[in-house]
Image: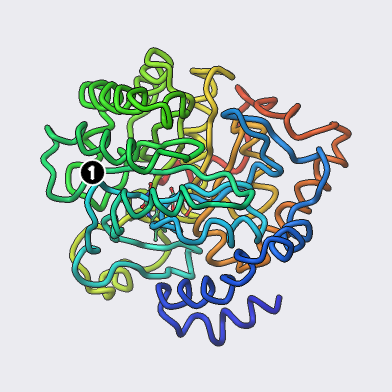
């Protein structure tokens, strides 16, 4: 309530980038003082088995984590952990540092509870991220999302991914291959099996070459705009090549999912392109999750992301087959207390269901349609 008031009066007037920066600056002291951080974390994550899940070799006190893009340079994962996220996917990091795309890169579309971004992987490079991941001391589980530099040709992409994974993957808890961001030209072509196979092979080879990275779980992050057949093909490939899981989904380039008038979107005055996140992605993300679960069962860890705004959404994703669930836009709109409220509402939901733990409920709705799909899904 208070955050909503603040959002509609103050925060909306500040640019999204500036709002992020301010929030993280305020949170910094929490992350540095371990007893304070742990105390805050006890306030934001209920300490019981109701919402604990086990995956990728770790025990997650809640299935809720932060999606890639929010902590691009691995600088804030402990603050985010203190706010109530059990894990943070940092990045996307590329082998070499790079600047954002020129021009405006991020806009809020409040009418859609969405964000439109065309950042293009601004980051300080894999080496810098590796140093921060290496120096970590807290309890947050950290995955590293890797990509290629903007100027790297698609044919050379496997080497870029391998380099970024080998560098930034050291001491990371898992590595995610981002082949689904719409803001790096051609990147989404890497999601096609013919290109993805050699790319995964190169990264697996690079990870197994060092003791520090050998055995690190490897996942791939896919686009909501893939055809159903391509989703199946990636799922089959992930099984064949022994990946640990799939993150689904990234942002969409489809504008027809928006209620914001096209003239308003056009008035953002930026070059064509940009990915949409948040509420308009909810149904497609859930559909992709259901499809993946139907294909792979419990043989892969499915991390569901896209339009998660409430405990009810997390509940639905887990029951549809997700072991872990991530959010970005829902957190931006919901504010700093949002993860806490989701965790507590989720714990209450599990308790009311009579289950001992949410872990028992992973995939129980698989194969059933339902949910909020339907009219909205048809817009995709
Ligand atoms: C501003 C912004 C930047 C993002 N940057 C990345 C990124 O660098 N790498 C990536 O894999 N996904 C990135 N994403 C996509 C998110 O990780 C997520 O897949 C997507 O936003 C859908 O989740 P949401 O609806 O909860 O926001 C970004 C999203 C936003 C809004």
* Image quadrant containing the C terminus: top left
Closer to us: 202 or 226: 202
Q: Residue at x 81, y 39 (%)?
A: 50
Residue 309 in the image: above or below residue 369: below
x, y percentage for residue 372? 60, 43
Q: Answer with the quarter of the image where residue 187 lies.
A: top left
Question: Which residue is denoted by mark 1 in the rendering?
Answer: 148
Residue name at image x 61 percent, y 82 percent: 6
Residue 349 coordinates in the image, percent (x, y) = 80, 44
Counting the numbered discs, the total is 1
For the N terminus, the image quarter is bottom right
- Measured as percent of width and height from the top left, residue 110 is found at 48, 70
Q: Quadrant of residue 370?
A: top right
Q: Residue furthest top?
A: 240
Q: Pick whichever, 131 or 87, lies toward us.
A: 131
For image coordinates 61% across by 33% down, the residue present is 323
Query: Front-most of 116 and 155?
Result: 155
Point 57% across, 79% down: residue: 7
**Above or below — where is 62 with respect to 239?**
below
């Amino acid at each position: 309530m208070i955050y909503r008031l603040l959002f509609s009066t103050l925060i909306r007037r500040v640019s999204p980038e500036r709002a992020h920066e301010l929030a993280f600056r305020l949170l910094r002291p929490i992350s540095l003082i371990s007893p304070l951080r742990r105390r805050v974390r006890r306030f934001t994550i209920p300490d019981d088995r109701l919402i604990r899940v086990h995956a990728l070799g770790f025990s997650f006190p809640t299935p809720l984590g932060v999606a890639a893009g929010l902590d691009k340079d691995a600088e804030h994962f402990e603050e985010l952990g203190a706010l109530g996220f059990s894990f943070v996917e940092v990045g996307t990091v590329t082998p070499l540092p790079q600047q954002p795309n020129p021009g405006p890169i991020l806009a809020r579309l409040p009418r859609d509870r969405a964000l439109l971004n065309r950042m293009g992987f601004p980051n300080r490079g894999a080496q810098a991220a590796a140093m921060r991941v290496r120096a970590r001391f807290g309890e947050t589980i950290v995955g590293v999302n890797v990509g290629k530099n903007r100027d790297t040709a698609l044919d050379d992409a496997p080497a870029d991914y391998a380099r970024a994974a080998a560098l930034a993957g050291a001491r990371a808890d898992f590595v995610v291959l981002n082949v689904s961001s719409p803001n790096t030209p051609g990147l989404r072509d890497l999601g096609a099996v013919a290109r993805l196979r050699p790319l995964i092979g190169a990264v697996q080879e690079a990870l197994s070459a060092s003791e520090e990275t050998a055995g690190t779980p490897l996942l791939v992050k896919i686009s909501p705009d893939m055809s159903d057949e391509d989703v199946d093909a990636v799922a089959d490939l992930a099984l064949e090549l022994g990946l640990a899981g799939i993150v689904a989904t990234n942002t969409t380039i489809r504008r027809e999912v928006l209620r914001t008038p096209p003239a308003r979107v056009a008035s953002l005055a930026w070059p064509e392109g940009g990915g949409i996140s948040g509420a308009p992605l909810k149904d497609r993300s859930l559909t992709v999750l259901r499809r993946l679960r139907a294909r792979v069962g419990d043989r892969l860890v499915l991390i569901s992301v896209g339009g998660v705004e409430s405990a009810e959404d997390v509940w639905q994703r887990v029951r549809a087959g997700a072991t872990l669930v991530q959010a970005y836009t829902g957190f931006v709109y919901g504010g700093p207390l949002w993860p806490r409220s989701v965790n507590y509402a989720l714990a209450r939901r599990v308790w009311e269901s009579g289950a001992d733990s949410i872990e028992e409920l992973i995939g129980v709705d698989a194969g059933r349609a339902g949910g909020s799909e339907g009219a909205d899904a048809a817009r995709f």
